[in-house]
Each structure stands twice: as structure tokens, then as C-alpha cells.
Image: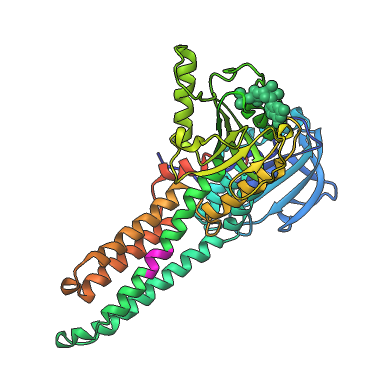
Amino acid sequence: MVINTNDTITAIATPNGLGAIAIVRLSGNLCLKIVSILFVSKEKKKITELKNNTMYLGFIKQKNKIIDQVFLCFFKKPCSYTGEDLIEIYCHGTLYIQNKILKLFIAHGARLASPGEFALRSFKNGKIDLIQAEALSELFKAENEEAHDRAIQNFNGKFAIFLKEIRQDLIYLNSLINVSLDFDEDNISEFNYKKFITTLVCLIKKIKRTMLGFKTNNLLKKGYSLVLVGRPNVGKSTLFNLLLKKERSIVSNISGTTINYIEEDCFIKGIKYRIVDTAGIKETNNTTNKLELQGIQKTYETISMADFILVIKDNLEQDLEKDFKISRKKQIIIIINKCDLLKKKIISNKQYILISAKYRIGLEIIKKQIKKRLNSKYHKTENIINNMRTYEGLKQVVLTLMKIKKTRKNYLTPEICSFFLREANSNLGKITKIITNDEILKQIFATFCLGK
Ligand SMILES: Nc1nc2c(ncn2[C@@H]2O[C@H](COP(=O)(O)OP(=O)(O)O)[C@@H](O)[C@H]2O)c(=O)[nH]1
Ligand SMILES: [Mg+2]
């Protein structure tokens, strides 16, 4: 499928619905011709007199009938978002007016744009690179501050700076072997193998560190799983509701009330979690109730998938971690609930947090502890890879560099190094621009909104 970028496209750039103002966009060669028929400026300016980056008050007219009083903004090519002549009409935001203007543009030769087609033209005309395009797509999806910050950083070129550094490192590696290429064969030992390999290993580590950030990014988007486990009646559902700030799970003193697990998204200190309330696991698993058994099986499954586990007890004695077969590698926070019933006075310490879910005591300590564990478990830096395509691109670079690293010293000639360094450089290039396959491009830009 070929992407046509020669015609003139139009779309409503503001959300579908009634608003104070709506924006209708028009981009391509026919822009000026179309508005010369439909727009009359208040100052009776000719369309050929329109200046770049300037707004004009006027009317959209169909023959002599006024459709709306609007502002027209003209962005002359190549100084526009799409790199083509681009016109934005700021009209009154009724559905009738927005659609009428759109229909008039189409009737006079424009085509309705597909989602992301303006951004696609921007990319094709070299106004933004693919990383920026993808960052834009992430920006639209960003639901919280973390996701927003990463997307905006990439749109403003943070990842581009990283790629530039990698390219410079490759050039430096190349310079190390080029010294030896200048020598004749007898002097091949001049190739400083040790320095070359040390630099190469550093570079591989640097890229891998950044790739690790991709996994963190994915978790941040979808939410870390935080599972509440414990014996029946210890107050799991009460704490679950408290964390969610709503009565989502049934609280009761009847053992076995929560049969299946319940999960909900929630933000704790700005980070997204998927909190799971599970069926309590009894001391002796002698229940024959099929539903209860299934519920307990599901609890074990959620434990194995969890990023964080809150083990809830209502006394100090129970040793549940072993009982519930929780791997030591998991992030476990032990909580002693119902502190309001305790006769002896004890306080929270490194081993456990004392709370009363019913009386809302100790919730802030739990939240702080979760945040602390999160920071220690998942490093927060280098979270600049937003998508699988970039991740795979960097993986190819690493795989190519690994080919050099794995080649035995005796066989590693400067020519071989040079060959693989060129390959790595080409892998790197593919990440930012050299994508010729229209299908891939369409996939990337199709995630955008209409009018973007
Ligand atoms: N005194 C006291 N009772 C609590 C506390 N938290 C929960 N409960 C009670 O313990 C019972 C079981 O609570 P629930 O949340 O359903 O426990 P789950 O089976 O672990 O989900 C209910 O009657 C709750 O009101 C608490 O902090 N103090
Ligand atoms: Mg429950």
C-alpha cells in the first residue's frame, strides 16, 4: 500500500463534540486555492497577500451565505507542522459548523485525512523524526505525570541525544581500529585490542541499561501488580477498599467472603498499580468447597505473578510467607492489621508495619514503604524507550556489537571489526528514520488522533 502525500488533506483537529471553539485543518497544495473560494477576510485581503504565521479574522462563506465568523491562520510551506502549506480555521465549536466547513473543504478538492496523517506528512517532510512521532503518540496516551514527562522529553529530543552519543561511541571505536588499518600487515599488532574491547563492552552495557528502562516503562504504563494475601478475616478486603478509596470488595466477618480475586487500578504516590484482593488461604486446606478451592488456586497464581505482595496478618505469630510459598525474590511487605485490638503496645519496625484498616491507621506508612521498595527495585533513570520498535532496534545494535565481542582474539581483524561497526551504525540509523516500508509507517501513525 502506497501512502499518498501529494493531495490536500483536511480534518477536525479538536475533539468530537460541542465546544467553544473548534479547529479545522487543511494541508497540501490546494490549501490556498480552497480558502480563496471559501474565506473572505474582514479586511478584504487577497489570499495571495496572506502572510506566514499570521491570523486573519473573516468569514467562511458558501456562495454568499455566511457559515461562520472565523479566524484563519496560515502557515506557509516549509515553515509549517506538515512542511506543506497548512491552514487552520478556528470556528465556533458547534457540530454543525465544524462539519459544514469540513464538508466544504472536501467539496472543493480536499480529502478527509486518516488519523495521524498530518504527523505522517510532518515526518515525510523531515519536520519530525520517528522518535518524535512516537513520543507524540505516547503523549496522547499519557495518563499520569511520569508517562507525560517521558513522552515530552523524547519529543524534545532526549532520546535523539542518546542516539547521537551511541553514534559517537561507534565512531570512536572505528577510530581505534582505523589506526591499525593504516599500518601494513606486519604491523597488525598495533591494533589496540584491549582498549578496543574495553570500550566496546562499555558501549554494550550503556545500551543494555537503556533497554532495561523499557521494561520499567511498560510496567509504569500498565501498572505494577500489588497483591494482598493472608488468612481469611485478617482485613485484606478492608485494606483493599481503603487503598482504592471506595467500597469495592465485600468486607465481612464471615470467612471465605472473597472467593475470587478482585483487581482494580489505583495510583499510589503518582505511580499506577493494579491492586489485587485475594481469597484468604486457610491454615488447613481441608475444604471440599470447589469454588473456595478454585479461589485459593487463583490466589497462588496471583502471588506468582505479583510485583509486590502485602502479606496481611492479624497477630504477630503467623509465619505466612513460607506457608504461602512466596519466593524470597519477591518484594514482600508484612502488615499486622487490627492494631486497635492489641493489648500490648507495639510499634512498626523493619519487619512489619502495624495498621488498623478499619480505623484508617498506618495507611501512609504502607504507601511510603511501597514507594521506597519501588525505587530500590526498578531503577528510574534512562526510561526513554517508549515502544517495542525502538527496543528491537537497539537490540539489533547490541547483537551486532556482541558478534565482535564473541569473536576470538586471533580471528578479530580490523576489517571484521570495521564491517560489524558499519552494520551497527546502520541498525542505529533505522531507529530514527530510514523506514521505507509504508505499512510500518501507517501502523505507527494510525495510533494518532484524527486531525493530528
Ligand atoms: N477491629 C478491627 N477489625 C477489622 C480491621 N480491619 C478489618 N476488620 C474486620 O475484620 C473482618 C474481616 O475483614 P475483611 O476485610 O472482610 O477480611 P478479609 O477476609 O481478609 O478480606 C470484618 O468484620 C472487618 O470489619 C481493623 O483494623 N480492626
Ligand atoms: Mg476478603
| For residue 285, side relative to residue 424 (left or right) | right
Relative to 227, is 3 on the left or the right? left
Instruction: Provide the residue span drawn in magenta.
Output: 202-206
* Residue 88 position within the rendered picture, expressed as x and y whole percent measured from the top left: 70, 46
Can you say which quadrant of the picture contains the C terminus? top right
Residue at horizontal 27%, vertical 67%? Answer: 405
Q: Which residue reaches farthest front?
A: 344
Query: Is the stretch drawn in magenta largely helix, strand or loop?
Result: helix
At 67% across and 46% down in the image, what residue appears?
A: 348
Residue 105 against residue 365 in the figure, above or below = above
Residue placed most toward the observer, 291 or 27 = 291
Q: Residue furthest top?
A: 289
What residue is rendered at 49% in x and 20% in y?
Answer: 295
Q: Where does the image place residue 389, in percent across and percent down from the top left?
A: 43, 49
Does the magenta segment cover residue 52?
no
In this rendering, the answer to whether 73 lies above or below 258 is below
Ligand 1 quarter of the rendering: top right
x and y, in percent, of residue 66 in the image = 82, 33
Q: Indicate the quadrant containing the N terminus: top left, top right, bottom left or bottom right.
A: top left
Residue 253 appears in view? yes
